[in-house]
Image (cartoon, grey):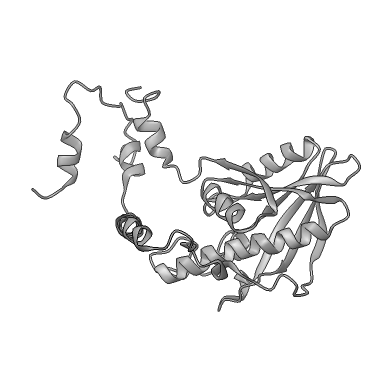
Amino acid sequence: MHWCPIIKQTRRSVNTPQPRVKEGRSGYTKKTIFRVETPIKRRLSLAVFFALLFCPLALSSASSNRPFVDPNFYAYDSKAHFDVKVVPYAKLGTISVAQVSFPSPVVTPYPVNNTVTGFLFLPSTPGPYPAMLVEHEWLPVKLENEFRMCRRIAEGGMAAFLIVQPYSYNRRPLPRIPDVELLSADVPQMVGAVRQAVLDARRAFDWLSTRPDIDPGRIGVAGISLGGIFAPLIAGVDHRAKVLVTIVGGVDVSDIVFDSPITYGI
């Protein structure tokens, strides 16, 4: 029997209460809008499926003392000199915010993507401060949630550095180029973008560690959504990250709303 959406829908027990969804003016329900499957989503699902299928085979055949991931994949020249531009950006109460830019360790064919942008939040109390590198969600528009998070971190007496990921925010090539995205149906493009995100974070660690107002022995990394996936990857690659915080890393928000035991049937 071939799988189809109808079979998937009827597999629910007839006694299970169905969630109520409101129909909008366009005729689509909220659940329908959230459940639309794009070609990119289908391809990514297949990629994840085959990765999960073949990873156990690779792990079983690999030597126990051999790393599964080549550490050189995330290697870079940490001693290379790079220029950093820091300009005042905003004042949020007692918290000062500066906009930071520096060259990415990875050079791509898209110049706008080759400069890393970040925002440094500093408290008003004397340093040196512990610092948290913050990775944002997938394709943010205004970085509102991340700014709020960084402000709260700074109000707690820590520095926060919000870093813009490759092909995101002001680093996104315009007009939009199909498949030239951080998450892309072009798998080599996506792998390269993820590698660039990790190396950008490592270079941010390099810069933060040189600042007299930052304690290099107390640096962590946090992430929201897609950033919640990148954060543990960064912490696993670079041991300068002493603290790791992930917030809804890789979670399907529509599944939380519609299928959670707490909200199901509301």
Give the total number of marks visible in the rendering: 0
Determine the residue positioned at 69% across, 61% down: 117
Q: Please state if 119 lies on the left or on the right of 95 as rendered.
A: left
At a point 64% along the width and 45% down the height, the residue shown is 146
Point 70% across, 64% down: residue: 203
- Taking the image as drawn, is residue 173 in sight? no
Q: Decide: is 129 above or below 152.
A: below
Residue extending farthest left: 1
**Quarter of the image containing the C terminus?**
top left
Report whether 16 appears left or right of 175.
left
Kindly indicate the quadrant of the structure image that contains residue 207.
bottom right
**Residue found at the far right of this picture:** 126
Residue 255, by quadrant, is top left
**Residue occupying the point 26% across, 26% down:** 18
Percent x, y for residue 223? 59, 47
Residue 193 position within the rendered picture, expressed as x and y whole percent measured from the top left: 52, 66
Q: Residue furthest bottom?
A: 109
Nearer to me, 90 or 125: 125
Q: Is residue 84 visible?
A: yes
Nearer to me, 195 or 256: 195
- Give the image location of residue 204, x and y in percent: 71, 60
Left or right: 82, with 109 as reference point? right
Classify 109 as above or below 236.
below
Please give left or right for residue 9 compared with residue 99 in the image. left
